[in-house]
């Protein structure tokens, strides 16, 4: 299907106002990324890039489209200088301007032809392709191991945060019950402290 120059130019403008973010947490959602970046610009769309080498195609990279190219520069600058927090854990994410090749729905460049061919084992490119295949397999195994470790770490952190939150809530309930049962007033009378002072 041929792409018109106008259609490809519109796609080019979309690329200019899109940011590529890498090294995201596997538990990050569209809502989390949007909320984090909306403070620096108007996020139009967050599209995770599936990683077909990982279990369940967990995406750790995303294309974030914002309102204009100026906002992309602002967000990239902010992410380079400030920690990006996800689920209470700072993530060492990388952000940079998107490139046309990162979009799986990109239109074909006008005038460009794509040719596919089989490589014969005697072809010089056959050995290169074979090395790439082996490297991809090795990387897939390494990524699988790292992802498992990372998910375990984030699950432990989530449990600790929940325990801390529950402990804080229990303390609040105790303080609330002390105040509501007028225990504070009786203690103030017992130790001859004015109620106004006790409240402060």
Image (spheres, grey):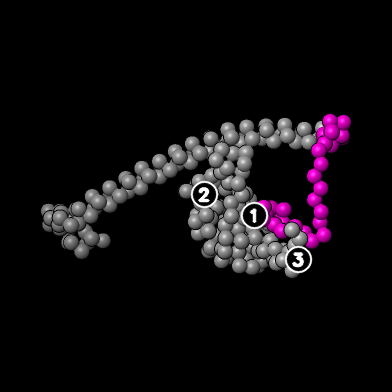
Earlier along the polypeptide chain: callout 2 or callout 1? 1
Residue 191 among magenta residues? no
Q: Position of residue 67 (x, y in %)?
A: 61, 67
Q: Do the residues labelled 2 and 1 touch (CB within 8 Å)?
A: no
Q: What stretch is highlighted in magenta?
A: 99-126
105 to 42, vertically: above or below: above
Q: Specify whether residue 192 is in view.
A: no
Local packing at callout 2 (Cα closer than 10 Å; few below 14, some 14-19, many 20+) is some
Question: Magenta span has 108?
Answer: yes
Q: Is the magenta stretch mostly helix, strand or loop?
A: loop
- Dividing the image into 4 quarters, which one contains the N terminus? bottom right
The residue identified by callout 3 is 4
Label whose residue precedes the other's in the sequence (1 or 3): 3
Residue in view at x 19 percent, y 53 percent: 178
The answer for how far apart the CA atoms under marks 2 and 3 are is 36 Å
User: Residue 146: x, y in percent?
Assistant: 58, 35
Q: What element carries label 3?
A: loop
Q: Residue at x 66, y 66 (%)?
A: 69
Q: Judge from the rendering whether residue 59 lies leftward or rightward of residue 153; answer left or right.
A: right
Which residue is labeled 1 in the image?
Answer: 20
Q: Residue at coordinates 27% horizontally, 47% vertically from top-left?
A: 170
Res 175 seen here = yes
Pinpoint residue 198: horizontal percent, then vertical percent. 21, 59
Binning the other alpha carbons within 10 Å of mark 1 as few (below 14), some (14 to 19) or many (20 upward) gives many
Question: Residue at label 2?
Answer: 28
The residue carrying pointer 3 sits among few (fewer than 14), some (14 to 19) or many (20 or more) residues within 10 Å by Cα, namely: few
């Amino acid at each position: 299907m041929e792409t018109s120059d106008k259609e490809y130019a519109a796609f080019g403008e979309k690329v200019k106002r899109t940011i590529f973010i890498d090294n995201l947490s596997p538990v990050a959602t569209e809502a989390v990324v949007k909320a984090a970046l909306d403070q620096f610009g108007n996020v139009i769309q967050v599209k995770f890039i599936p990683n077909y080498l990982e279990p369940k195609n967990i995406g750790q990279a995303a294309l974030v489209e914002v309102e204009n190219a100026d906002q992309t520069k602002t967000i990239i600058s902010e992410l380079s200088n400030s920690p990006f927090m996800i689920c209470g854990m700072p993530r060492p994410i990388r952000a940079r301007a998107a490139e046309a090749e990162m979009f799986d729905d990109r239109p074909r460049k006008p005038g460009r032809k794509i040719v596919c061919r089989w490589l014969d084992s005697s072809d010089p490119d056959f050995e290169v392709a074979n090395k790439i295949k082996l490297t991809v397999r090795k990387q897939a195994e390494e990524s699988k191991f790292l992802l498992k470790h990372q998910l375990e770490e984030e699950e432990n952190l989530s449990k600790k945060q929940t325990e801390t939150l529950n402990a804080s809530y229990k303390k609040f309930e105790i303080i609330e019950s002390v105040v509501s049962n007028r225990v504070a007033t009786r203690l103030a009378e017992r130790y001859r402290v004015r109620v106004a002072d006790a409240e402060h």
